[in-house]
Amino acid sequence: MVRTITLYGDPVLRRKCSPIDSVTDDIRQLADDMIETMRDAEGVGLAAPQVGVSLQLAVVDVSVEDESVTRVELDGKPVTLAAVSPLVFLNPELELTSERELRVEGCLSIPDVRAPVSRPASVIMRYTDLDGQPHTLAADGLLARAIQHETDHLNGILFLDRLTTAAKMSARRQLKRAMAEW
Ligand code: NI
C-alpha cells in the first residue's frame, strides 16, 4: 500500500527514531509499503519518519542510477548492486572515513528543492535486515549517499541542515516557493 509522505514542517521529521528490537509482521508490512511508496514517488530512498513512523527503518533503491556505484560489499564479499536492491535496513550505524564529494540532493519530503550536499564518498554500514540478521555493507557512489541521507532522517536530520551558507540561502528561496504550492 502506498502511504502518504510527510512534508517538511511535520515534527515527525525532526524526531530521533527509536531502534527496532524485534521484526514483527507490522514492521515487514511497513517495509513493503515504504518500497511501494518510494517507487510510486520515483525516489531512490525513503525513511520511516517520511511515512509518519518514528522507527529506525529505511529503504534504498539506486539501481536506476547504478553507474555511480563501483563498490558494494556485503559481509566482506563483493556483490552486485541488484543483489542488495531494494535495500531494507534497520538500526543503521555508519562508519564514515572517506573523503568528501559534492552532489546535488533532493528529498521526497521537501519536493522541488534541490541543493549540493558534501558527504563522504563511501560508507560502511552495520545494520539489521528484515530477518533480524546483522550485516555489514560497504558502498560508494549514490548508494553511499542515499544510505547517509536516509540514516540522517532516522536522526531527525534533513539534507538542508548539511548545506553551506550560500547553498542554504538558495535552498530557502526554493523552499519558500515550493511550500506556497504544497
Ligand atoms: Ni529525504
Image (cartoon, rainbow, N blue to C red):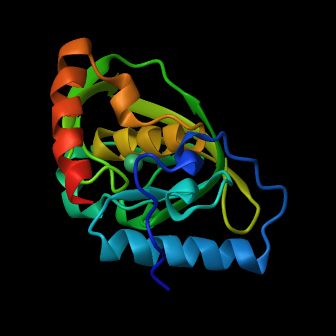
Q: Residue at the bottom extreme? A: 1
Q: Quadrant of residue 100?
A: top left
On the question of residue 94 being in view, the answer is yes
Percent across and percent down for residue 31 are 58, 71
Quadrant where the C terminus lies? Answer: bottom left
Residue 133, above or below 107: below
What residue is shown at x 63% (from left), y 41% (from top)?
Answer: 15
On screen, residue 163 above or below 72: above
Task: Describe residue 13's horizontal placement relative to residue 90 as left or right.
Answer: left
Q: Nearer the viewer, residue 123 or 33?
A: 33
Q: Residue at x 56, y 38 (%)?
A: 156
Q: Inspect this view and state whether residue 103 appears.
A: no
Q: Residue reaching furthest front?
A: 180
What residue is shown at x 27% (from left), y 46% (from top)?
Answer: 69
Picture mark count: 0
Image quarter for residue 80? bottom left
Q: x%, y% of residue 44?
A: 33, 58
Residue sitting nearer the eye, 155 or 113 = 113
Residue ranking furthest to the right? 21
Please tell me whether residue 108 is drawn above or below residue 99 in the rendered image: below
Q: Position of residue 106 (x, y in %)?
A: 26, 46
Residue depicted at x 70% and y 71%? 27
Image coordinates for residue 87, horizontal then vertical, percent: 49, 61
In the rendered structure, the answer to whether residue 6 lies left or right of residue 12 reads left
Of residue 177 and residue 113, the one placed in the foreground of this image is 177
